[in-house]
Amino acid sequence: MIKCIIFDFNRTVYDPETNDFCLGALELFDVLGDRGIKIGVVSTGGEERQDLIKSLGIEKFIDYLKITNKKSEEDFNEVINLFGFNFDEVMVVGDRIFREIEIGNMVGAKTIWYKRGKFANELPKNKLQEPAHIIMELKQILDLI
């Protein structure tokens, strides 16, 4: 049973090209919250990313937010350990197989590649970059939990 989903921010929750949320992101966060599923967001960036997230008003949905210079296993493990979940109770959702998917697989989480936008044509180069699931719309996550 999935108890936590760790999301990437750019191009997974928020589309920097349109300066708006990705289609269905807010609705998904609302449903996940109603189901008691913890939401983590791990994103690269600095103070400007923190300010953007705050200005968007989505902090109310997010149980854990980590802004980092470069995503790592430690960042994902931090979220998992904070809530005391087993790795098989966690999903990682992202648009980059070379980042979120690979790291999610490294920590033993279930991975979902949100295959859309700028990085939709990336292909896995090794087993760690292969997602457990591929989705084209965020609402498909509800079918996988």
Image (cartoon, helix red, strand yellow):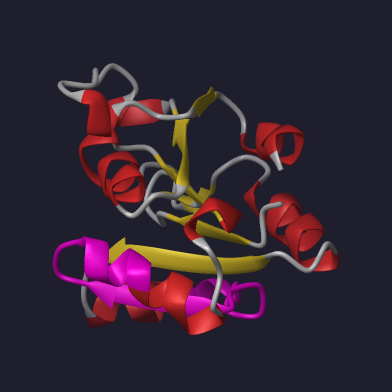
Instruction: Say if 2 sits above or below 24 in the image.
Output: below
Count of numbered marks: 0
Magenta stretch?
53-77
Residue 135: where, in percent of width, then height? 55, 26
Q: Nearer the viewer, residue 132 or 17?
A: 132
Instruction: Say if 132 sits above or below 29 in the image.
Output: above
Magenta-drawn stretch contains 126: no
Residue at the image position 75 percent from the left and 33 percent from the top:
143
Residue at the image position 47 percent from the left and 55 percent from the top:
7
Q: From the viewer's perspective, is 6 left or right of 104?
A: right
Residue at the image position 20 percent from the left and 37 percent from the top:
98
Q: Which of 67 and 77 is in front in this view?
A: 77
Residue at the image position 47 percent from the left and 83 percent from the top:
82
- Quick one: which residue is furthest to the right in this view? 34
In which image quadrant can residue 24 be found?
A: top right
Q: In which quarter of the image is the C terminus?
A: top right
